[in-house]
Image (cartoon, helix red, strand yellow):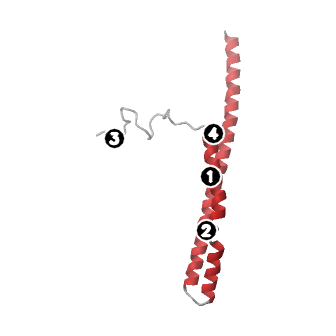
């Protein structure tokens, strides 16, 4: 057994050489960002469906002196907290991937421009 080594046949992951199979293009980033946005949109609607009824039931139980009313209100509040956290996470993913897509497109244009200038230099050196 050897530790701290790379498998002879390549293997994946780890901190070894760059994996040439790993590639992300703008279409991938855009698709994932779109899916995160769609998830957020649907979750904001569907995830809130039971909230008003749960709140009304909690208030009615509390007003009827049932101890389960306060417990149901805690469930309601906890659900809202988790729901907002998940909505924020979806928005951050979507926004970050939109930003990354735009930044990569800008980098591609700049690199293309740099390559053209290098080829002009090569013409002068010939």
Q: CA distance from mark 2 to mark 4?
A: 33 Å
Against 20, is 59 above or below?
below
Q: Tell me the residue that label 3 is attached to.
A: 3
Q: Where residue 62 appears, x then y in whole percent?
A: 61, 86
Question: Circle 1 is placed at which residue position?
Answer: 36
Q: Earlier in the sequence, mark 2 or mark 1?
A: 1
Q: CA distance from mark 2 to mark 1?
A: 19 Å
Mark 3 vs 2, N-terminal side = 3
Residue at x-position 67% and y-position 20%: 118
Say if mark 3 contacts mark 2, CB within 8 Å.
no
Q: Earlier in the sequence, mark 3 or mark 4?
A: 3
Q: CA distance from mark 1 to mark 3?
A: 39 Å
Which sits in the foreground, 84 or 116? 84
Residue of label 4: 27
Q: Earlier in the sequence, mark 1 or mark 3?
A: 3
Q: Nearer the viewer, mark 1 or mark 3?
A: 1
- Is label 3 in a helix, a strand or a loop? loop
């Amino acid at each position: 057994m050897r530790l701290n080594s790379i498998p002879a046949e390549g293997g994946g992951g780890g901190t070894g050489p760059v994996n040439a199979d790993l590639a992300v293009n703008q279409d991938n980033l855009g698709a994932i960002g779109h899916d995160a946005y769609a998830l957020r949109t649907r979750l904001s609607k569907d995830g809130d469906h039971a909230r008003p009824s749960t709140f009304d039931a909690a208030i009615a139980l509390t007003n009827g002196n049932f101890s389960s009313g306060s417990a149901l209100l805690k469930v309601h509040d906890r659900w809202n907290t988790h729901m907002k956290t998940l909505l924020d996470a979806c928005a951050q993913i979507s926004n970050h991937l939109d930003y990354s897509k735009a930044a990569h497109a800008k980098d591609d244009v700049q690199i293309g421009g740099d390559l053209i200038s290098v080829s002009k230099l090569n013409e002068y050196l010939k």
